[in-house]
Amino acid sequence: MKGIDTNILVRFLVGDDELQAQKVYKLFKSVESDKNEVFVLLLVVLELIWVLESVYEIARSESKILDSISELLLMQILKFEHQSALQQCIRFAYDNNYDLSDLLTAYSANEQGCTSVLTFDKKGSKHPIFELAK
């Protein structure tokens, strides 16, 4: 199995570079026809969120980022690191305005057995998995 970098997912979702987007579509079709998967690290998802918010200025309130990640999770050719944590994060994120990277941190830590995540972030600490460091 091969892993993929953030720029592959960005080209797939945004299509801002037509040549690279076509290469990604061709790659995904090839992976699908070979009945293979490509691996998506949690770090790649985190970077994807950052790129979509910062570079492409997609507002969290529009839910486009959440919808895009949800659709990626449905693709049979993509195997995600900590997939259940990512799914929990996305489900929870629709109903609140917590920072997506904070939610991803919380649910990933929780999946690994952490009872809480210590933080200085007062807004983030309101989430039940976070605990304000004193």
Image (cartoon, helix red, strand yellow):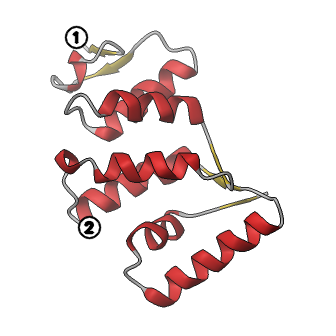
Q: From the top left corner, tell me how far across and down residue 35 is, in percent.
A: 82, 59
**Which residue lies at the image location 46% right of the left edge and 73% below the top edge?**
11
Check disc 1 and report the residue beneath it: 134
How many residues crowd mark 2 within 10 Å: few (<14), some (14–19), many (20+)?
few
| Left-right relation of 44 to 101 | right
Look at the image and tell me in which quarter the N terminus lies: bottom right
Question: How far separated are the C-alphas under marks 1 and 2?
Answer: 34 Å
Residue found at the very far right of the displayed protein? 34
Is label 1 in a helix, a strand or a loop?
loop
**Which residue lies at the image location 25% right of the left edge and 28% below the top edge?**
95
Front residue of this view, candidates 18 and 43: 18
Q: From the top left corner, tell me how far across and down residue 73 is, in percent.
A: 54, 46
**Which residue lies at the image location 60% right of the left edge and 83% below the top edge?**
23
Q: In which quarter of the image is residue 106?
A: top left
**Which residue lies at the image location 45% right of the left edge and 87% below the top edge?**
18
Foreground mark, 1 or 2?
A: 2
Q: Relative to residue 57, is residue 88 depicted above or below?
A: above
Is label 2 in a helix, a strand or a loop?
helix
Q: From the top left corner, tell me how far across and down residue 71 is, in percent.
A: 48, 51
> What's the residue type where badge 2 is placed?
Val
Q: From the top left corner, tell me how far across and down residue 122 is, in percent.
A: 16, 22
Mark 1 touches mark 2? (CB < 8 Å): no
Q: Relative to residue 69, is residue 88 depicted above or below?
A: above
How many residues crowd mark 1 within 10 Å: few (<14), some (14–19), many (20+)?
few
Check disc 2 and report the residue beneath it: 55
Q: Of marks 1 and 2, which one's residue comes earlier in the chain?
A: 2
Front residue of this view, candidates 96 and 108: 96
